[in-house]
Amino acid sequence: MILDFSSPIDYLWALLPEVVLAATGLLVLVVDVFQRGSRSGPSRAWVGWTAVAGVLLALVANGYLLEFEAPGRSGMIAMDTFRIAMNFVILGATALGLFLAFDYLRREGMDIGEFYFLVLMAAVGMMLLAGSRDLIVVFVSLELMSLSAYVLTGFNRKDPRSAEAALKYFLMGAFASGFLLYGIALLFGATGSTNLALVTSEVTRGAQEGNLLLYAGVALVVVGFAFKISAVPFHMWTPDTYEGAPTPVTGYMAAGVKAAGFAALLRIVTVELAPAAEVWTEILWWLAVLTMIVPNLIALAQDSVKRMLAYSSIAHAGYLLVGVVAGSSAGRSAALLYLAVYSVMTIGAFAVVGLVAGKGDSRTGLADYRGLGWRRPLLGGLMVIFLLSLAGFPPTGGFIGKLYLLIAAVDAGHVALAVILVVTSFVSYYYYLRVIWKMYFEEAPEDAVLPAAPGGAFRLAAVVAALAILVSGLFPGRAIQTAETVGQDLAPRPATPFSQPAVPMGVPDTTTD
Amino acid sequence: MDNFFESHWVLSLLIILPLAGSVACLAAREELARHVAFGTSVIAFLISLPLFWTFRSGTAAIQNYVSVPWIEAWGIGYTVGIDGISLLMVLLTTFVTPLAILGSYTYIQRNQRAYYAMLLLLLAAMIGVFVALDLFLFFLFWEIMLIPMYFIIGVWGGKRRIYAAVKFFLFTAIGSLLMLVAILVMVYLYYRQFGIITFAYNDLVQLPIARDLQFVLFAAFALAFAIKVPLFPVHTWLPDAHVEAPTAGSVILAGVLLKMGTYGFLRFALPFFSHAATSPAVIGTVMVLSLIGIIYGAWVAAVQPDAKKLVAYTSIAHLGFVMMGLFALTTQGIQGGILQMVNHGISTGALFLLIGMVYERRHTRMIEDFGGIAKVMPVFAASFLLVALSSIGLPGTNGFIGEFLILIGTFQKYPVVAFIAATGVIFAAAYMLPMVQRMLYGEIDREENRALSDITLRERVVLAPALIMIVLIGVYPQPFLSRTAASVDALIDQVELRAVAAPVVAGASDLRFDRMPILGADE
């Protein structure tokens, strides 16, 4: 079906998965009010399952988007495979996050309709952000996502850590939104449009003329996104927020918000603002380097597994930035693949942390993991797989993802970035290994509390996630090809992971330089 | 299938079977796991053994070769095959592993299922490293091997096991990660020159690499392999890992894992970066480091009160000999080096098994805690003596053949180096014989030692194959040497040819190492 963006009805078709998800969210909210006796009591189990069903339905609707075509680049929402792929990542992360959160929510008495509503709304925001081709839509979807995330962070009202986390997140997030909005305003001033297709053509001209307004706008937009993806030095809110938020929310934010932020960054910066590359390459190069080095070093000193994973998620933003800096089709494909794998492994790891933490979300220290691997073999085994994947160790998807990023970096001539990525990954081995050795090499103390056994939904989802990580590590062919196609679809480029050979094929170049 | 042993299936089965056995161990009952593991490893050995005869020794061609596309987008294939060098390494691996497993039967008391599953996983990864002819596949096995070893040392090791396990892991990992970047750079260069993305060994080994760049890439590979060997300044993980690991861990560590480093030099670093590898600077460095390893290893071994630590340091000395032989780049030197890799695997493996046996009885490894135990453990003492003599390199044992060939091979090109290294043979006697004497002979001066029982039937079964091989290779090494001869000669030719043919500056050098934005735009 061919969509015509001059008709509002066709926009509804183009936004099918978002519409499905938003409708489910509203349904959950309304139904929940009627079926719940008291305001503070828990919801019935099927409220949560309704939300999951909505996400699954949205996944189907998202697949249906492949049927549509939208000629031209003028619409406010993209209709390319990149958006669809990012939607799959975000929806998959949402479904996985919900499956793994049920045990936790019931335990902490957070099993109420509003929670699911907020999660779904955040997902809608993320998806819109990933697909937006207009700076206004960027801002609106970013706010939808962020506001939902602020409330989710503070969702456990009885826990002061949760409230503190939410306040910090909100204040810093508002600040970041300000930067972004200012950047958008400057870009509008420089180009006269918020539509990215028009902005791009103006940027091409502006970059030639050395337009200062344009440069400032690009820089501010980049900074605004850097807050959202928690790139160093705009990461200050992340450790406290991630540590204080309810653990499943942390996992969801670390995966979903980051995925959406990167999707927007990849689309807007590396494609639409490509003519202004000399501005953002330099900024992002430094952000990438700092974001790889700083959190990996700080994570070494953490005694709390949850806080350690928070720093680890910052570090992963650094690895992903390498793909953005590469700025090539390969870089985008690599970042996309890595985002998909990263979502699964980070949600999985945080879910295990949430389960081990026990009532009150309190046992998150390294010491609480002593002997866990032998006492809860399933949890231990899952955690090992998630951690090894986060470390980028073969044969996991995390390794393939990092390899792809390395290939993209080498291809783009950023060997220095590749080396930094490798060395910082090496540093990260230590703190991932430390959790493993606590789980297996040390004995549990006499008075240790055995974490509750995970429920059926958790087992199913976590085992599927772990298997997905292993399979994507051993047989990544299809995933790589998909990522490659999608990366090229965003901005058509040559059909190989490397850019074209500089010399004709088969002729060794012996010229001196 | 009558040609099973000439097909790749024999190699693939050697990888798949231990993996399946590993899963079976986890599923088996706690007390049955060890039998499952031992059975699997014996079957693996029996599968691999006929290779020794079906292998065509007159040719340097890769045999049992297969290449199946795996990750086509990146030109990665499941490519395996063996030549004379990897043949011996595969057989060494399958030979040592059952002994290590049988040697653990009574030593490992808790979490047996996981322990034996890890050992079999390790077996699969080790075979994989030696047969992989695709750099991605090689790297995969090279890294996977770390995980089971990390657990074996960390869970079932001694008091400082966590420190040793983490140190082992991190030391090996830093080298291999830099190697990964070097591999990617090579793949990229190959693409720039020939327009094809490939990780296949047979392709990359033909890549011309600019001379200056060769040194950088060689350094990355060499670091990974040197840590594994281990060469002198990066050897510090080895004594810790050996001492803390359970017996089987030490046996496999010494028997097989260290060989991955020397094998890596032979298979990858030498032919890939021939110009760098044959340059006086590199050869000189390797020779000096090897000599330091030989002499320093021997001296430090001589003062160790702990028998296991003593043997650990002898590994450094022995592997120093091997490295010296390989980098002499003469037929005898490399052949001797390869044979010495096998010898060291058998002899040192047996020494660790023997020390494990007395440790199980006395729960101490201090040399001073023993004395005169030959009187109560005669079979043990005789075995220990033979293995110790093989480790020294006494004529008639396998150690003599290996060291002698290495010294001849090195003497042809670097007589001074060979002269200094020969003193290492004397030092070997100086640390090994006093230990033998103080532990086995003299009067029994401790009451606890009077009640020691001689080794059991199971322990005799563990030791017998190693003892037989020590004598067999010692008196009749020809079958082993003839199988490596063609491969070694071809390797030397290849290295010499590529060393000369390496472009002074190739198109390769347009790799923009310095494209850090802060350094200014370069275009």
Image (spheres, coloured by chain):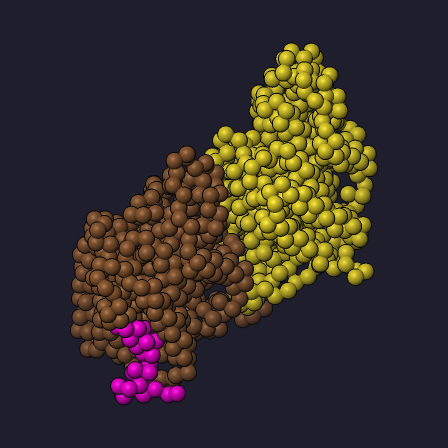
Chain colours: A brown, B yellow
- State the residue in front, A60 or B224: A60
Q: Position of residue B476 (x, y in %)?
A: 82, 37
Query: In which quadrant of the rendered view does residue B153 lie?
Result: top right
Q: Position of residue B310 (x, y in %)?
A: 60, 26
* Residue B44 position (above or below residue A39): above
* Residue B45 position (above or below residue B300): below
| Residue at 60% in and 37% down | B249
Position of B334 compared to A229: left or right? right
Query: Where the C terminus of chain B falls, by quadrant?
Result: bottom left
| Residue at 59% in and 53% down | B138
Residue span colored magenta: A1-27
Position of B220 compared to B21: left or right? left
Decide whether residue A444 is among the magenta residues. no
Query: In which quadrant of the rendered view does residue A33 lie?
Result: bottom left
Residue A326 visible at all: no
Residue A243 visible at all: yes
| Residue at 35% in and 58% down | A101
Q: Position of residue A414 (x, y in %)?
A: 41, 58
Q: Position of residue B267 (x, y in %)?
A: 64, 50
